[in-house]
Image (cartoon, rainbow, N blue to C red):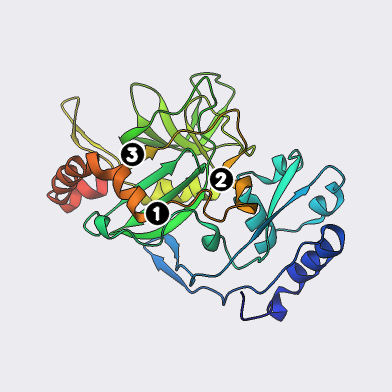
Amino acid sequence: MHKNRIHSSRKLAAQFLLGLIALFFVQCSASPAPKKKVVQKKIQVELIPPEVSITYHLICTKDSNDWLRALQPGDTLTALLAVNRVDRTNLMYLDTLVIPDSIGIGINMYSPFPKKVDNLQNVHKIMFISQYAQAFAVYENGVRIRWGPTSTGKKYTTTPNGLFATNWKSKKTYSTVNPSWILEWYFNLANLDGVGMHQYALPGYPASHGCVRLYQRDAYWLYHWADQWVVEDGKIAVYGSPVVIFDPYPFGERKPWRLLAEDLDAIKITPAKLSAAMKDFLPTVAERQEKRDSLSQKELLTSR
């Protein structure tokens, strides 16, 4: 149940949703109050809004390309893209669209990840990537500060699960699979295996050759947020920020986020689940963090 109607400043989004009601009998309701924003160094961090009740609907997009093309950049489009794990270009190729009944400001209300994980309150920085939910989340001292959609490895070139770290980075590099593929805001995760995260197309399903694809805005943000490794005498002296990749993707089955129309907890990741995914890695993360904390200020600046 929602307590407030869509604010008058959201008139454009409201008109879109009302039109959608007439066409697909989708019920739309209110949006939460706008979030405040804080700035941390040069990284924008969005405060997480209060919990709201959201339901989802599925529509066929076969005969609806006109209104999809008409969508202008803004909260409505941003939400639709994130919920469907797709970018603007590939939105037009989906056969089915997941639509939340409330379009708010930003995408934090649609995150499958929990706001807080108490077991991580002593971990300064950590990133999680759920292959099942095709989404990532970033935590600082157990508080989620960002999430977004991903496209991980396809069935025959899957992204490996486990504990990784942000090693070296490049504003622009080229794929070792095909040199014509330009990878912007690249951060390496597994140096010997060539696995990294970077900006690239999100088609709404796992499609990469093992890397973690991201929106450009997310890749750019992570590029500046995460720490690089420190290498001495050809060996890793200090690891970068920890990254935990977990859960397999159900290839050959329905896309998990489409199950939201039937089960609101279909892709929900609880604090207990994140703690379980992290359990075996926590001692290693703590040890690596202690080494990084012992670095001098000059060394820290070098690793950024």
Which residue type carries mark 1? Thr
In space, the residues marked 3 and 2 are separated at their CA atoms by 18 Å
Whichever of callouts 3 and 2 sits on the residue coming sooner in the sequence is 3
Question: Foreground residue, 72 or 233?
Answer: 72
Question: Foreground residue, 141 or 266?
Answer: 266
Q: Which residue is mark 1?
A: 270
From the top left corner, tell me how far across and down residue 242 is, in percent. Answer: 29, 43
Which residue type carries mark 2? Tyr
Relative to 180, is 241 on the left or the right? Answer: left
Q: Tell me the SS state at disc 1.
A: loop
Residue 241 visible? The answer is no
Residue in the picture at 36% in, 47% down: 127
Which residue type carries mark 3? Thr
Residue 222 higher or lower than 195, as above or below: below
Residue in the picture at 37% in, 32% down: 161
From the top left corner, tell me how far across and down residue 239 is, in percent. Answer: 23, 38
Residue 79 higher or lower than 63, as above or below: below
